[in-house]
Image: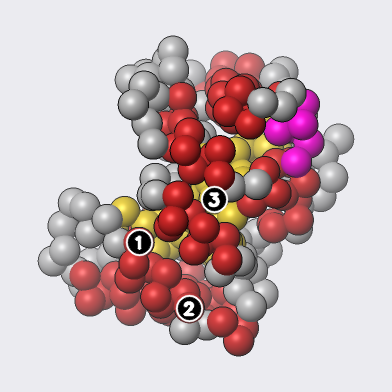
Amino acid sequence: MFIDSHTHLYSKDFEADFQEVMEQILRSDVRLMVIPGVDVHSIEPIQKLCETYPQYCFPAIGLHPTEVKSDFGEQLQTIRQHLNRSHYYAIGETGLDYYWDTTFKAEQIKAFRAQIDFAIEFQRPLIVHSRDAFEDTLSILSEYKEHAISGVIHCFSGTVEQAQKAVQSGFYLGIGGGVTFKNSKLPDVVANIDLQHLLLETDAPFIAPHPYRGTRNDSRYIPLIAQRIADIKHVSIDIVAEQTTQNALQLFNLPQPI
């Protein structure tokens, strides 16, 4: 049994054959899926998805750093209103992304801090996106040590040293399809970080694992990621499944899967 700790199943990439994909996922060994938001426009489709599949899909809400623009304050206000009205299992995805554009770097930092405040206020874990911004990300998170915030560094792609720092800060590492890629540095990270600090994720529809790299990703491919981790760790895939499932259940306070 597996948990996909990060999938955008509501994405328009699934519009044409959503029902077929969902049926295939539900027939697989993936039992639960955490569905993170990226902006205010993703709130409604996530709610609809999670209301339709309440035993399998669990919503998170947040403002993705690449979606932070001049209206970020209004978006955050809307997100907070929804947090007051509905139950969300995490705040995110939030964080910092300096890869594509740094025009709104200052606003990204402000939005990240605001969403950390949401996590503290509503006692929810954080789903953190960090691309070309790890040092700033960890520096900001370290300012909140006294609040004992927790979460996951989603789609982790850093060094072993950065992974160790993230774990020491109380965060899990989200490991996705990248760990299966040739020349990936993630196997070194996985080899040096205990399973109790790892979560499985697809980030669907992005980053499909080998041998499906370059195609649309979905939660059915989680076992491929788990098998690669098992190979690196020299353990059975059952051990990876059991530990990562318990990690996700604990972090997100998810119900036991049926």
- Would you say 153 lies left or right of 197 here? left
Q: Residue at x 65, y 47 (%)?
A: 194
- The numbered mark, 2 or 1, whose residue comes first in the sequence reads 1
Crowding at mark 2 (Cα within 10 Å: few <14, some 14-19, many 20+): some
How is the protein colored in the picture? Answer: secondary structure
Could you give the CA–CA distance between mark 1 and mark 3, rounded to whole angstroms? 13 Å
- The numbered mark, 1 or 3, whose residue comes first in the sequence reads 1
- Residue in front for this viewpoint, 209 or 74: 209
Question: Quadrant location of residue 170?
Answer: bottom right
Q: Quadrant of the C terminus?
A: top right
Q: Position of residue 62 (x, y in %)?
A: 46, 62
Q: Residue at x 60, y 86 (%)?
A: 146
The image's mark for residue 173 is 3
Q: Residue at x 82, y 39 (%)?
A: 257
- Would you say 151 lies left or right of 106 here? right
Q: Is residue 239 visible?
A: yes
Could you give the CA–CA distance between mark 2 and mark 1, rounded to whole angstroms? 12 Å
- The amino acid type, in three-letter code, at marker 2 is Ser
- Element assignment for label 1: helix
Residue segment shown in magenta: 238-243
Q: Give the vertical position of 40 relative to 186 (above or below).
A: below
The image's mark for residue 134 is 1
Which residue is label 2 attached to? 142
The image's mark for residue 31 is none
Crowding at mark 3 (Cα within 10 Å: few <14, some 14-19, many 20+): many
- Would you say 108 lies left or right of 180 here? left
Magenta includes 242? yes
Question: Quadrant location of residue 28?
Answer: top right
Q: Residue at x 31, y 53 (%)?
A: 131
Could you give the CA–CA distance between mark 3 and mark 2, rounded to whole angstroms? 16 Å
Q: Position of residue 93 (x, y in %)?
A: 46, 57
- The numbered mark, 3 or 2, whose residue comes first in the sequence reads 2
